[in-house]
């Protein structure tokens, strides 16, 4: 036999095995096993599930027109107006709703015989001749100030007595900066007998105005 007449033959793949050619166009992860049918090999892979997109912001047409404003009150994300005006329950306690997200220190304070809530933000240095201040009265057994009107040591407060404000937000003389006035009472004073600035001024007890200011 003449060598030139011999035609080379491509070896056939053993039964049940895939050749390089049979892998063409087969996406990985399709689950086609060796010896699978042509229809199975040609089938497209299943669609990949896509998580739905959740809208957390309302469409532009539904947004409230106000970007910012004064005197807002906010309850569960809903904005109302008139939040700056104190409202009182029938028992004389301020009808305040506040969730105190920063865990700040609060206190009960008398104003005109009613109870309001105050946030303590600490002592500040101001010039009352240049900065508007409001008056706060603290009922004490004893207090000692230096020549600058500052405390030499903490005053001896009456246990259980609330401090007293001369004003609240919405009043002309209100300020978030408070100047302390110390009302010196005898040891037999009954706590919370004094409940207003008027009570303090009419009491006859000594009142010492300090240069101590708090925000």
Image (tube, grey):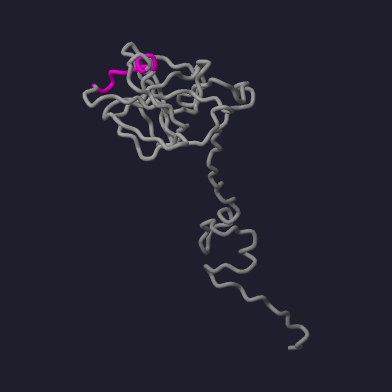
Question: Relative to residue 92, is residue 172 drawn left or right?
Answer: right
Q: Residue most toward the top?
A: 90
Which percent across, then down, holds residue 179?
46, 28
Image quadrant for the N terminus?
A: bottom right
Q: Residue at x 61, y 73 (%)?
A: 12
Question: Relative to residue 165, is residue 18 drawn left or right?
Answer: right
Instruction: Judge by depth and name the residue closer to the eye, 110 or 95.
Output: 110
> Which residues make up the magenta segment?
190-200
Residue 28 figure quarter: bottom right
Q: Residue most toward the right?
A: 4
From the image, give the main secondary structure of the stretch colored magenta: loop
Instruction: Judge by depth and name the residue closer to the eye, 44 or 206.
Output: 206
Instruction: Judge by depth and name the residue closer to the eye, 9 or 139.
Output: 139
Count all numbered tags in the image, as a single digit: 0
Which percent across, then down, holds residue 91?
31, 13
Question: Relative to residue 178, is residue 144 drawn left or right?
Answer: left
Q: Is residue 5 magenta?
A: no
Instruction: Judge by depth and name the residue closer to the eye, 134 or 6.
Output: 134
Q: Is residue 15 above or below residue 113?
A: below
Which percent across, then down, holds residue 67?
62, 25
Residue 196 figure quarter: top left
Which percent across, then down, holds residue 64?
60, 22
Q: Residue most toward the front?
A: 147
Residue 119 figure quarter: top left
Q: Residue at x 51, y 57 (%)?
A: 31
């Amino acid at each position: 036999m003449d060598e030139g007449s011999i035609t080379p033959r491509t070896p056939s793949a053993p039964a049940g095995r895939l050749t390089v050619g049979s892998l063409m166009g087969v996406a990985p992860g399709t689950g086609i096993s060796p010896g699978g049918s042509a229809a199975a090999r040609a089938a497209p892979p299943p669609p990949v599930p896509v998580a739905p997109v959740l809208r957390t912001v309302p469409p532009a047409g539904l947004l409230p027109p106000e970007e910012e404003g004064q005197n807002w009150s906010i309850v569960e994300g809903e904005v109302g107006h008139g939040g700056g005006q104190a409202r009182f329950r029938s028992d004389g306690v301020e009808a305040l709703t506040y969730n105190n997200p920063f865990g700040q220190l609060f206190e009960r304070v008398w104003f005109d015989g009613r109870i309001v809530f105050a946030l303590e933000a600490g002592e500040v240095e101001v010039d009352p001749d240049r900065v508007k201040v409001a008056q706060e009265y603290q009922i004490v057994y004893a207090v000692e100030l230096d020549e600058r009107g500052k405390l030499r040591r903490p005053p001896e407060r009456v246990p259980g007595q609330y401090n007293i404000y001369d004003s609240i937000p919405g009043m002309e003389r209100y300020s978030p900066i408070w100047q302390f006035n110390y009302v010196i009472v005898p040891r037999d004073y009954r706590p919370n007998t004094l409940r207003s600035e008027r009570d303090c001024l009419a009491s006859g007890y000594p009142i010492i105005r300090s240069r101590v200011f708090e925000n």
